[in-house]
Image: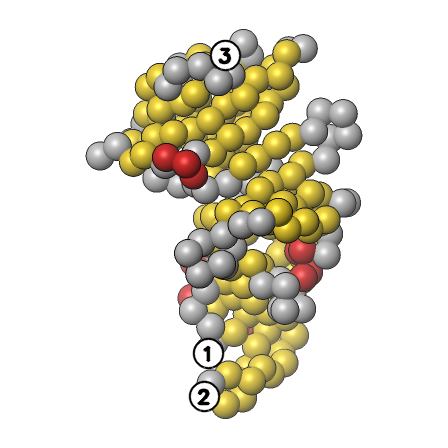
Amino acid sequence: MLRLLGLAALSVSITAAAQPADVSVVGLFPNKAVLVIGGGAPRTYAVGATIGEGMKLVAANEAGATVEVNGRRQTIALGEHVNRRASSDRASVTLPADGRGHFMVQGQINGGSARMLVDTGATMIAMPASDARRLGIDYKRGRTGYVNTANGIAPAYKVTLDTVKVGDIEIHQVDAMVQEQGLDIILLGMSFLNRTEMRREGQQMVLTKRF
């Protein structure tokens, strides 16, 4: 079933050879994506198709489209605008606010898919134990601490994540806290956000990698 993204179309600016090419994802279904290349008309491409000079569609699913550019792969996640700055090689991602004004992101932790809520009030990334287990994180080997929850004090475990990726921004060795109670979604906290520049533009938040 075709999933149209409408005004929430994704866009990525990629340098292929010497010419930049804008790629927007306006529809997705299994193993195919509806793409707009360089502002042209929408076209449906199957996985494996060449979509521009030096560019190839290598995967498409409900989470987004993966484009290979001169041997390097980049996934354009739903609802995000990704822009790689060729001049400084500083990656940035633009996150749209949802109907409640929250910023949700579909990213990756240690290579596994992770849906996260941006939370500038969280000192570090916080995640439920169920997500930690799904991602293969042996959190009980981490340092034990305690957090306040709606049901009282609960144990938590401090761990270091190998990689956290949001759009085109990938950061290594990120501190996180795993909670067994009181949390039902991963919070993208300041241990990740402090390593980006954050800028609010109306109903969008722009993150640019610092280091």
Q: Nearer the viewer, mark 3 or mark 1?
A: 3
Label whose residue precedes the other's in the sequence (1 or 2):
2
User: Is the residue under label 1 in contact with that under label 3 (CB below 8 Å)?
Assistant: no
Amino acid type shown at disc 3: Gly
Label whose residue precedes the other's in the sequence (3 or 1):
3
Question: Is 106 situated above or below 184?
Answer: above
Q: Quadrant of residue 19?
A: top right
- Residue 181's disc is 1
**Residue indicated by mark 2:** 151
Dot 2 falls on a residue whose secondary structure is loop
**Residue indicated by mark 3:** 52
- Residue 164's disc is none
Q: Residues within 10 Å of mark 1 (few under 14, many from 20)?
A: many
Does 168 sit left or right of 127 as displayed? Answer: right
- Please state the horizontal and vertical placement of residue 182, each as a whole percent of the image: 46, 78
Amino acid type shown at disc 2: Asn
Residue beneath the point at 50% across and 59% down: 102
Q: Residue 116, can we see it? A: no
